[in-house]
Image (cartoon, rainbow, N blue to C red):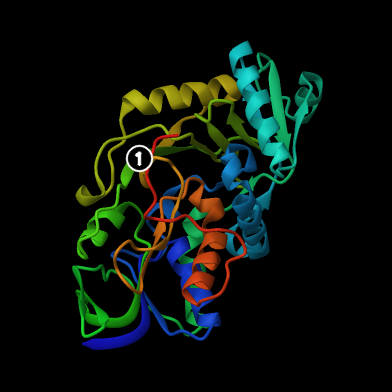
Amino acid sequence: MTDSYDIAVIGGGIMGCSTALRLAEGGMWPIVLDQGDLGQGASGVNAGTLSLQIKRVKLMPYALRGHRAWEAMGDAIGFRKTGGYTLAFTDGEAELLQERQTLKSEAGAPIEFVTRKALREAAPNLSHKIIAASYCAADGYANSSLTGQYYRGRLRDAGIAYRERCGAMAVRREAGRFAVETPAGTMHARRLLLAAGAWLKPVAAFLGVELPVRVRINTVSVTERMPPLIHHIVGHATGLLTMKQKPNGTVLIGGGWQGRGTPQEGRGEVTAETVAPNLALAQFALTPLKEARILRSWTGFEANVPDFYPLAGPLPGIEDAFVLGCVRGGYTIGPFIGSLMGDLILGREPELPLFDPGRDFDED
């Protein structure tokens, strides 16, 4: 089978799908290709946290707009605006919290500091050893497991072609267009967008481009159903904890603790050495969790580059090719930065600047 399109989008996560939707709105005919099911990579296995308190200051304008996009999706993606607390248990953590959240507030996030008395009244099950806390009324979460279902429906409604379990086996330029070899045949397109998340590096290598992409193997755990314990999302000043109780009573626990493995090997491996301290911190923050059983822990791959800012722009050295990925807080920011990428490809001026993939990658 041979098909021809205006653009081939390699990667059917939030960013790839949201870009395709913007391109179709602008009159292009895209196809979205994913090696698995749509939205089942990092977009579908993360903790679903939509917290402005854990976003980098420079990315706050993107996170604010991304957050509004999730709110507009509403029940279709399980969106809940619960408000969120970030906690500090030591003087050092309190100083860190004050410094970071002040900067984020100045960048536009509706963050305030709350007294221990107010915190205890609002969330009585949280530890009484908390010495400082910040609060953001806009914080909440969505159900990441609905990502694929949601975007599959959006693509279908927009008449956008997509192929699942149809990963790129090779990509080459021929006769002024791109040929993407897949298990379903060769797809041809005038333009190309790489939005393959943790698989960006090997896909870019098909075209002879070396991207400095690294991969984190984040771990998430879920408890059995519990009585109502907390109505807000909860984080820690260090960023090593995210926690929320879902409507069914289960508590979802994350925080970026690392497992083992590589994208090429398939799903990552959960390790007791990192799950144990993650759960211990959660139990310290929310004491009744000590009575809960953990039903399951899993991992998801998160791509990044050395400066931890996105890759979003033309693929260096390859005409009509673009790359989008490595977005810290990509679950929150993804829908918005995808629309920015769509505007760039359509020849429009994006609402906010994108992030040159050809820049020097110095550590922050």
Viewed as shown, does residue 102 lie left or right of 191?
Answer: right
Where, by quadrant of the figure, is residue 132 drawn?
A: top right
Residue 154 in view in this figure: no
Where, by quadrant of the figure, is residue 69 drawn?
A: bottom right
Residue at 67% x, 44% y is 139
* 318 lies above or below 292: below
* 347 lies above or below 39: below
Residue at 54% x, 72% y is 343
Residue 28 in view in this figure: yes
Image quarter (top left, top right, bottom left or bottom right) of the C terminus: top left
Residue 34 in the image: state x and y as whole percent. 32, 67
Residue 346 in the image: state x and y as whole percent. 50, 77
Residue at 76% x, 23% y is 120
Residue at 71% x, 46% y is 138
Residue 4 in the image: state x and y as whole percent. 30, 87
Mark 1 sits on what residue? 216
> Which residue type does callout 1 highlight?
Arg
Q: Residues within 10 Å of mark 1 (few under 14, many from 20)?
A: many
In the image, 59 versus 359, the foreground residue is: 359
* 339 lies above or below 224: below
Circle 1 sits in a helix, a strand or a loop, which is it? Answer: strand
Where, by quadrant of the figure, is residue 286 drawn?
A: top right
Number of numbered discs? 1
Image quarter (top left, top right, bottom left or bottom right) of the N terminus: bottom left
Residue 255 in the image: state x and y as whole percent. 48, 34
